[in-house]
Image (spheres, rainbow, N blue to C red):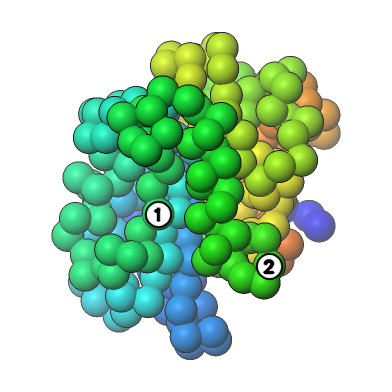
Amino acid sequence: MTATVVVHADPDLLAQAVAARLIVRMIDAQAERGEAGVVLTGGRIAAAVYRAVRNLPARNAVDWSRVDVWWGDERFLPAGHPDRNETQARAALLDGLPLDPARVHPMPPSDGPDGDDPEAAAARYAQELASAARPATLPHFDVLMLGVGEDGHIASVFPEHPVAYETRPVSAVRDSPKPPPVRTTLTPSAINTADEVWLIAAGADKAAAVGMALGGAGPVRLPAAGVHGVGGTRWLLDRAAAADLRPAFRGLR
């Protein structure tokens, strides 16, 4: 399936546009299924998107009590640590929404029930996904958001890392090339079950990875090239991140 590429002039416009797109997608999902499921990511642009959602009056058109919130990956750190993606998302958005706490599903922290065992934490998250999905293995993800690293990694799936070959839905990550070295992540096999996958990138430091991913790089060498939604794949970029794309991709919104 061909990816859709949307380029915005700058990071602020990108964050606002993604926020508006997310609200509309949640409304449409609830109109169709009665509920919605979103998978969150981390990073600077993600935090900007979450703040933009918080500031949009249209957020009140979503019934947040019927939204399931999941995470694509997490730094294996204690609960509340400022470097956890959960901590970032709660501060930027989630703590201000009328969510059902039972439908917010953070990945286990390193001081959680599994202690400092990331493999057990990954297995626990896989079980939580399966419990929410019964009789399926994974719940319905309407939107799965991913940042794109300078090296082309997505979630905590890094180039040439063994996790790229994982068939389990959730995996521990050791020896991450970016700190912290221990993480948990959805694997590509789980990511690719989402209805829509959104890859969001801003800044000139992402341009080479974006250009390679959309230029046909292999998924092990460049994990961002190997993820896609069942119903659609969207690359949501600012002008700097799109600098290495072919001219056909560069129309601004």
**Closest to the observer: 78 or 93?**
78
Instruction: Say what secondary structure mark 2 lies in.
Output: loop
Q: Amino acid at mark 1?
A: His
Instruction: Point out the tag, 2 or 1, that comes first from the N-terminus.
Output: 1
**Residue displayed at 52% across by 66% down:** 132
Q: In this figure, what is the number of numbered marks?
A: 2
- Report the residue marked by disc 1: 105
* Quadrant position of residue 221: top right
Residue 136: give its label. 2
**Closest to the observer: 37 or 47?**
37
Q: Amino acid at mark 2?
A: Ala
Please, is residue 38 above or below residue 87 in the view?
below
Q: Position of residue 94 (x, y in %)?
A: 25, 56
Please, is residue 101 above or below residue 201 in the view?
below
Report, in whole angstroms, how far the alpha carbon at label 2 lies from the one at label 1: 17 Å
In this picture, residue 47 sits left or right of residue 189: left
Question: Quadrant of the image for the N terminus?
Answer: bottom right
In this picture, residue 249 sits left or right of residue 207: right
Residue 181: give its label. none
Can I make out residue 212 in this image? no
In this picture, residue 160 sits left or right of residue 181: right
